[in-house]
Image: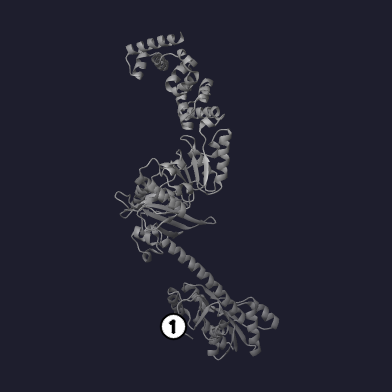
């Protein structure tokens, strides 16, 4: 039999020690070869204290996974070793088989078993008409005394475990081995399964410990009594303790500053509490561990408050670009004219693919609304939508915004570098507005990104792969720019895969009336007007006669000016018209152009219109001040004399305009 010191290190199969003396050892030797493919067996002929020392030493080095033993030796080892111990279990069949064998040798037989007797013994006595003593023992000394006493009583055959059988033969008696081959085989199979489960549990424990050791956050686990079961290196550093000194000890005794009353006494979570431990300020989380309503222990996590402050500073000064979200859908492209309906149809068709889209159209026609709507309708809707106006940045800044840069790439570069917008839009959409204003040098870099699907940040050596859908927009004639050498031909062809032309308002017959009403309502909501009103019919008529060179953006601004003058006020049409001629002259210029020179005599001079409008404003302020002229003068910043003069001049101007 190999000695304990010569045992090899842990193999891929579990290692099981079969602890046996004489007959038990021989039984193990006969049966273990059949299980050689499932486990490595080591038969060790030691018992009790010596066996326990050998097993514990081997367990520390990972050289034993489970132990098989019988009788008092097995019972002792269960109390003194740190690995699973599987006992050879004696069945009623084993007892009757051994007694039958003993009866063939002599009628003067006795049964000696470990710890307890068996009820099957009485059935056997009655079946065979025998009367023999049965005893139990606990220690080796007890077993030896039992055997000697039975010899003195005239017994000739003693049935029992290996220890008892050997003691009987030492006294000159016949010893019958109690364990059957099947019982030992079952014990070996149970040991293999126990070792397998122990290895699985060990791997889980090692995996968990590895994960915990790599966390920056400190973690300690305690049992229901507050005794430390495990802690990771960061927690050792934060608490100023060593793992081998604190394992098994009560955490509150070793680190009094950390109270476990909440999780262990009351089953309550205590999250993000600030606690000073030694000379450190820690952010602690204390969480109870429960299963089936039973409190099993608690987890305590800790972070250094200074580290959190450093992270916060880094987030504020060096955070990566956070892309803006989308506000618009394709249904926000209002209107029912054939031109805008065609735009919506193309947008829905193009949204399903990832090809580059070029949107052309005058300023203010809603190109970004269209781009956002296409993104929202696309499979990329759950990823970023990033927009940048290429005309709003000088060339060096635009390059760093689009492609990012590495730390130290140039003088003044942000510590830690900066993520470019192409990287920020990964898996989503990037909207390059006013692409026609992009410098030629950057057009070359953009072309490479579109072709290679890679971005090279300024100062970097390795490109970064990106998956981005590009939507570009311009109000300029890119065809003409290509002919004049102002825009790269190859980039134009790369951008002009799918094209949408946004129609100007003057070409959207029938949409202006609908859009004017909708934008007027929106303007009132922005101004916080409690009771929005409809756009006056005469203003709507003016809108329909105007060409809107600034398109929707101009219409939105004009109608907001109208809302300031009209919404929420009780004014006559005449007074409103006088004000609007001053605040939105473009609408009236359009009317004058249509009316021609013959209509000019119907309008008052500009000076009279200004005086009337000024007087109307003063009267509104007076009304708000309940007629208190002093209060009105303070608000208007004029003297009482000036107030009287302007009111009088306004009245005269209004009378002149009526005549």
Q: Residues within 10 Å of mark 1 (few under 14, many from 20)?
A: few
- SS class, disc 1: helix
Residue 268 against residue 69 in the figure, above or below = above
The picture places residue 49, in percent across and down from the top left corner, at: 45, 79
Residue 374 against residue 73 in the figure, above or below = above
Residue 197 against residue 385 in the figure, above or below = below
Q: Residue furthest left?
A: 411
Q: Is residue 602 visible?
A: yes
Nearest to the observer: residue 226 or residue 443: 443
Q: Is residue 584 visible?
A: no
- How many discs mark residues in the rendered view? 1
The picture places residue 587, in percent across and down from the top left corner, at: 47, 23
Residue 346 left/right relative to 274:
right
The picture places residue 527, in percent across and down from the top left corner, at: 45, 28
Residue 179 left/right relative to 235:
right
Residue 528 against residue 624 in the figure, above or below = below
Nearest to the observer: residue 322 or residue 559: 559
The picture places residue 90, in percent across and down from the top left corner, at: 60, 77
Q: Residue furthest front?
A: 483
Q: Residue furthest bottom?
A: 172
Mark 1 lies on residue: 6
Nearest to the observer: residue 255 or residue 391: 391
The residue located at (45%, 74%) in the rendering is 62
């Amino acid at each position: 039999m190999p000695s304990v010191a010569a045992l090899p290190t842990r193999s891929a199969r579990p290692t099981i020690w079969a602890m046996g003396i004489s007959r038990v050892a021989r039984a193990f030797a006969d049966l273990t070869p059949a299980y050689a493919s499932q486990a490595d067996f080591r038969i060790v002929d030691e018992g009790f204290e010596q066996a326990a020392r050998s097993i514990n030493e081997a367990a520390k080095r990972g050289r034993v996974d489970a132990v098989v033993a019988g009788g008092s030796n097995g019972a002792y080892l269960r109390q003194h070793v740190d690995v699973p111990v599987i006992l050879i279990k004696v069945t009623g069949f084993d007892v009757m088989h051994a007694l039958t064998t003993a009866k063939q040798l002599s009628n003067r037989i006795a049964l000696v078993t470990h710890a307890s007797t068996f009820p099957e013994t009485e059935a056997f006595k009655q079946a065979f008409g025998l009367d023999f003593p049965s005893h139990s023992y606990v220690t080796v000394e007890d077993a030896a005394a039992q055997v000697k006493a039975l010899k003195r009583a005239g017994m000739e055959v003693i049935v029992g475990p290996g220890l008892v059988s050997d003691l009987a033969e030492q006294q000159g008696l016949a010893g019958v081995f109690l364990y059957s081959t099947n019982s030992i085989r079952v014990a070996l199979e149970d040991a293999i399964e126990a070792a397998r489960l122990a290895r699985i549990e060990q791997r889980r424990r090692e995996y968990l410990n590895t994960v915990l050791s790599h966390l920056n956050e400190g973690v300690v686990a305690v049992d229901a009594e507050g005794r430390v079961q495990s802690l990771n290196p960061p927690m050792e550093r934060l608490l100023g303790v060593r793992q081998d000194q604190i394992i098994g000890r009560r955490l509150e005794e070793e680190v009094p500053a950390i109270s476990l009353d909440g999780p262990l006494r009351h089953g309550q979570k205590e999250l993000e509490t600030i606690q000073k431990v030694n000379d450190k300020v820690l952010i602690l989380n204390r969480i109870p561990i429960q299963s089936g309503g039973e409190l099993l222990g608690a987890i305590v996590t800790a972070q250094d408050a200074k580290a959190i402050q450093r992270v916060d500073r880094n987030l504020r000064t060096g955070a990566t670009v956070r892309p803006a979200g989308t506000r618009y859908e394709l249904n926000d492209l209002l209107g029912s004219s054939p031109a805008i309906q065609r735009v919506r149809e193309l947008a829905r068709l193009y949204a399903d693919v990832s090809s580059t889209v070029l949107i052309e159209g005058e300023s203010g026609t809603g190109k970004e609304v269209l781009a956002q709507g296409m993104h929202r309708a696309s499979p990329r809707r759950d990823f970023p939508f990033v927009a940048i106006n290429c005309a709003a940045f000088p060339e060096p800044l635009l390059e760093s915004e689009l492609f990012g840069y590495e730390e130290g790439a140039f003088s003044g570069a942000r510590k830690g570098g900066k993520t470019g917008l192409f990287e920020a839009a990964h898996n989503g959409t990037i909207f390059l507005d006013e692409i026609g204003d992009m410098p030629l040098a950057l057009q070359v870099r953009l072309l490479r990104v579109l072709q290679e699907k890679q971005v090279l940040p300024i100062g970097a050596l390795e490109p970064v792969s990106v998956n981005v859908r590009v939507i570009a927009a311009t109000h300029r004639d890119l065809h003409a720019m290509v002919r004049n050498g102002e825009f790269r031909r190859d980039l134009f062809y790369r951008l002009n895969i799918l094209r949408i032309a946004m129609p100007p308002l003057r070409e959207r017959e029938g949409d202006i009336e609908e859009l004017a009403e909708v934008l007027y309502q929106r303007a009132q909501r922005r101004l916080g007007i409690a009771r929005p009103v409809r756009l006056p019919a005469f203003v709507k008529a003016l809108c329909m006669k105007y060409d809107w060179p600034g398109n929707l953006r101009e219409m939105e601004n004009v109608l907001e000016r109208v809302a300031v003058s009209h919404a929420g006020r009780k004014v006559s049409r005449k007074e409103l018209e006088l004000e609007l001629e001053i605040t939105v002259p473009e609408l009236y210029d359009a009317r004058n152009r249509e009316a021609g020179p013959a209509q000019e005599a119907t309008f008052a001079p500009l000076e009279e219109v200004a005086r009337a409008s000024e007087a109307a404003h003063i009267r509104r302020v007076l009304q708000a001040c309940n007629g208190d002229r002093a209060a009105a003068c303070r608000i208007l910043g004029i003297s009482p004399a000036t107030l009287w003069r302007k009111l009088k001049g306004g009245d005269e101007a209004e009378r002149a305009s009526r005549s």
